[in-house]
Image: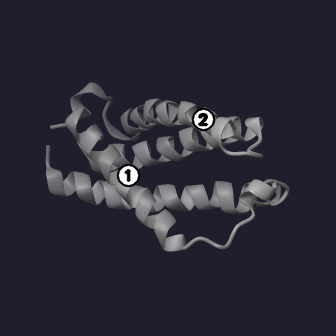
């Protein structure tokens, strides 16, 4: 595995994934979030979301780079990887309604679906940037 290529792909993928998350959470779901008190808080630093997205994407890029031979060539292979990684993230969101008072259960499904979309996008970027050896 080429570490520098994996890290670069993770950074690029993280930027793209963060933009996709911004569209899904910040624009599409904004009115939904405004309805629930659990989401009313002081504005968080956007740079923390960006940094977290980059870190997650770099870890995903390393995992993808290490398992590259198991996935099809190009964007479709990466998107498939992203889909399965997104499914892992999907099920983690069912923890939220159990521990956050006022967190609506249906939002776990929404967040899970948005994670699958974001990880498919990330995987597509990784598939385009990290070639099979």
Alpha carbons under labels 2 and 1: distance apart: 22 Å
Is residue 31 visible in the rendered structure shown here? Answer: yes
Mark 2: few/some/many CA within 10 Å (<14, 14-19, 20+): few
Front position in the image: 42 or 3: 42
Report the residue at 49% width, 55% height from top: 17
Horizontal side of 34 relative to 74 (left or right) equals right
**Residue placed under numbered mark 2 in the picture:** 95
Report the residue at 39% width, 51% height from top: 56
Report the residue at 59% width, 70% height from top: 44
**Residue placed under numbered mark 1 in the picture:** 57
**Badge 1 element:** helix
Residue farthest toward the right in the current orientation of the protein: 35
The quadrant holding residue 55 is: bottom left
Marker count (numbered): 2
Quadrant of the rendering where the C terminus is positioned: top left
Front position in the image: 59 or 3: 59
* Viewer-nearest of discs 2 and 1: 2
The answer to whether residue 83 is above or below residue 127 is above
């Amino acid at each position: 595995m080429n570490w520098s290529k994996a890290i670069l792909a993770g950074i690029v993928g993280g930027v793209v994934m963060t933009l996709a998350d911004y569209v899904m959470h910040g624009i599409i779901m904004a009115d939904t979030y405004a309805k629930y008190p659990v989401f009313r808080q002081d504005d968080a630093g956007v740079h923390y979301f960006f940094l977290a997205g980059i870190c997650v994407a770099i870890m995903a890029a390393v995992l993808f780079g290490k398992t590259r031979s198991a996935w099809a060539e190009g964007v479709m292979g990466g998107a498939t990887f992203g889909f399965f990684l997104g499914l892992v993230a999907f099920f983690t969101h069912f923890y939220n309604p159990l521990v956050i008072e006022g967190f609506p259960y249906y939002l776990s499904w929404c967040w899970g679906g948005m994670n699958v979309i974001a990880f498919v996008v990330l995987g597509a970027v990784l598939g385009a940037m990290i070639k099979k050896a």
